[in-house]
Amino acid sequence: MVVTRAVAALRGALGFLSRIPVGRTDEDWEAFRRTPAAMPAVGYAIGALVALPVAAAALVPVQVPPLTVGVAFAAWLSLVTGITHLDGVADVGDAAVVHGDADRRRDVLKDSALGVGGTVALALVVAGLVAAGAAVADVAARSLADAVVLVVLAEVGAKAATAALVCVGDAPHEGLGSALTAASGPRSLAGVALAAVPAALGGRAVLGSGGAGVVAGVFTAAVVVGALAFAWARSRLGGVSGDVFGATNELARVVGLHAGVIAWTLS
């Protein structure tokens, strides 16, 4: 029974967090929303898949410009994970710049129109992804294994940060946020942390002597982004929502990638 539920939760997480065709049944969704640890758990597979453009560029017999790899990385990421989370970035960006109280900001979150704040937020995230992809391509030119590990670490860290918000946050209204937060609590943080442990241990093993610093850099970035997102959402929106989860996922990935590359360069 426990194994069946765990498998269902993983399928639900893959169906929710990516466009991987695993099926999206009601049972999978229910198991997923009650298991926040499934988010970082599927980050391993998603991260490995997202790293394919970097690996392909490193393995082809011609030199591919890092910026080209960065563009391919960002485009491939959107194909693999969809644009649902980017929509969260846009909505949170619009809500962040609007004048008014929490009710007004929540109204902006629900508005499908794209404003200046959302446009700027999207541009920064996409530009950050392209730059991160180019930086990881430079890493791959010296060590493909290190580059892939960096991408996987950032993906697991981003998913763990999002899952942590699910565990500790409360939704200000009915919707995706409440569906996730109502089924979990702070006790679920232990499972989220446990799901990220293999990434930390594996990263240190593959990356060698500088692995501890890289792992610390990526995961610290994810923790900081998650903490800032939680604090902002609680003070400005009255709680976390589906848009906040999506924005946290995207921002934690971008910041984690850059932090990991910087730590790798310094190691």
Image (cartoon, rainbow, N blue to C red):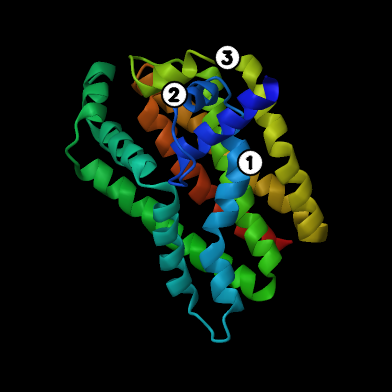
Q: CA distance from mark 2 to mark 3?
A: 22 Å
Residue where numbered disc 2 is placed: 26
Is residue 231 depicted above or below 196 in this figure?
above
Packing grade of label 3 (10 A; few <14, some 14-19, many >=20) is some
The residue under the point 58% across, 34% down is 10
Identify the disc placed on residue 185: 3
Query: With respect to residue 27, does 93 lie above or below?
Result: below
Q: Nearer the viewer, residue 186 or 102?
A: 186
Per the image, the residue denoted by label 1 is 220
Where's the N terminus, which quadrant? Answer: top right
Instruction: Name the quadrant containing residue 171.
Output: top left
Instruction: Report whether residue 224 is seen.
Output: no
* Dot 2: element: helix
Badge 1 crowding class, 10 Å Cα cut-off, few under 14, some 14 to 19, many 20 or more, is some
Q: Residues within 10 Å of mark 2 (few under 14, many from 20)?
A: few
Q: Which mark is drawn over residue 126?
A: none
Query: Mark 3 belongs to which amino acid?
Result: Gly
2 vs 3, front mark: 2
The mark nearer the N terminus, 2 or 3, is 2
Secondary structure at numbered mark 1: helix
Question: What residue do we see at 55% from left, 41% from top?
Answer: 158
Verify CB contact (< 8 Å) between mark 2 and mark 1. Answer: no
One can see residue 120 in this view:
yes
Mark 2 to mark 1 CA distance (whole Å): 35 Å
Give 6 or 129, whichever is nearer the viewer: 6
Residue at the left extreme?
A: 113
Residue shown at 28% from the left, 49% from the top: 120
Residue 251, position in %: x, y?
Answer: 46, 44
For badge 1, the amino acid type reads: Thr
The spot of residue 8 in percent (x, y) is 57, 29
